[in-house]
Image: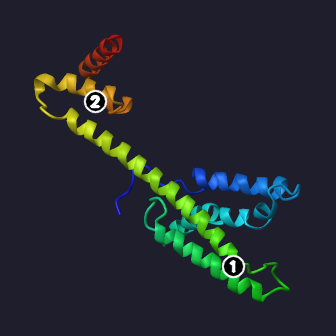
């Protein structure tokens, strides 16, 4: 897998942060005040389970070298975690009632799946949008180098600089004369 210019942000992912905030809201406000009825009491945290924990688990896998990329979660990674959570909380933990409090409710598995599907959908849409924006940027860079000649070099550099690349640091590597011409042309183009 090629390295994405927009890697998955794991703990800083908006889905993970939102799931954590919603969990806190449910735990400290909704449940204690009996807001939302049976859903918030029995299943809301289960819906939040995969959106919250998949980024954390994938980060741990990345640190251990089990995950070799920083791409967005794939469907099989989400499904794998759904299976692990389902087996753990619906089959194993309920066998130890003296140690763990768990009802072993099969509807929890559906709630995990709903959360996983919603998070997976968001992650795939976000990744597609970022990839599309990256391809558009790459096309602009490529177009900027079409018909590259010495006589059009300053204009080409100015055009690509207007698009946001190269960066100021990269421009600083050009000769002082070229830097001055590019800045002058950029000023002129801003006035147009």
- Quadrant the C terminus occupies: top left
User: Disc 1 designates what residue?
Assistant: 106
Mark drawn on residue 62 = none
The answer to whether residue 41 is above or below residue 21 is below
Label 2, secondary structure: give it.
helix
- Quadrant the N terminus occupies: bottom left
User: Disc 2 designates what residue?
Assistant: 160
**Residue 65 visible in the current orientation:** no
List x then y, in percent, for residue 16.
Answer: 62, 56
Q: Earlier in the sequence, mark 1 or mark 2?
A: 1
Q: Nearer the viewer, mark 1 or mark 2?
A: 1
Circles 1 and 2, Cβ within 8 Å, touching? The answer is: no
Residue at the (30%, 31%) spot, across then down: 173
Q: Is 2 left, or right, of 63 in this rendering?
A: left
List x then y, in percent, for residue 159.
Answer: 26, 26
The answer to whether residue 39 is above or below residue 154 is below
List x then y, in percent, for residue 11.
Answer: 60, 56
Residue 157, picture quadrant: top left
Residue at the (36%, 46%) spot, across then down: 132
Q: How is the image coloured?
A: rainbow
- Label total for image: 2
Q: Is 74 left, or right, of 35 in this rendering?
A: left
Neighbour class for label 1 at 10 Å: few (<14), some, many (≥20)?
few
């Amino acid at each position: 897998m090629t390295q994405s210019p927009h890697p998955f942000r794991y703990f800083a992912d908006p889905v993970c942060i939102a799931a954590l905030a919603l969990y806190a809201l449910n735990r400290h406000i909704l449940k204690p005040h009996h807001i939302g009825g049976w859903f918030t009491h029995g299943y809301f945290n289960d819906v939040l389970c995969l959106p919250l924990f998949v980024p954390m688990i994938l980060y741990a896998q990345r640190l251990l070298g089990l995950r070799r990329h920083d791409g967005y979660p794939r469907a099989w990674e989400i499904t794998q975690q759904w299976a692990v959570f389902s087996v753990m909380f619906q089959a194993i933990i309920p066998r130890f009632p003296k140690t763990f409090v768990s009802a072993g409710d099969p509807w929890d598995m559906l709630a995990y799946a709903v959360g996983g599907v919603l998070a997976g959908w968001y992650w795939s849409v976000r990744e597609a949008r970022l990839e599309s924006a990256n391809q558009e940027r790459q096309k602009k860079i490529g177009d900027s180098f079409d018909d590259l000649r010495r006589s059009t070099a300053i204009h080409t550099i100015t055009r690509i600089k207007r698009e946001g690349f190269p960066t100021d640091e990269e421009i600083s590597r050009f000769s002082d004369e070229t830097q001055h011409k590019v800045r002058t042309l950029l000023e002129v183009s801003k006035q147009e």
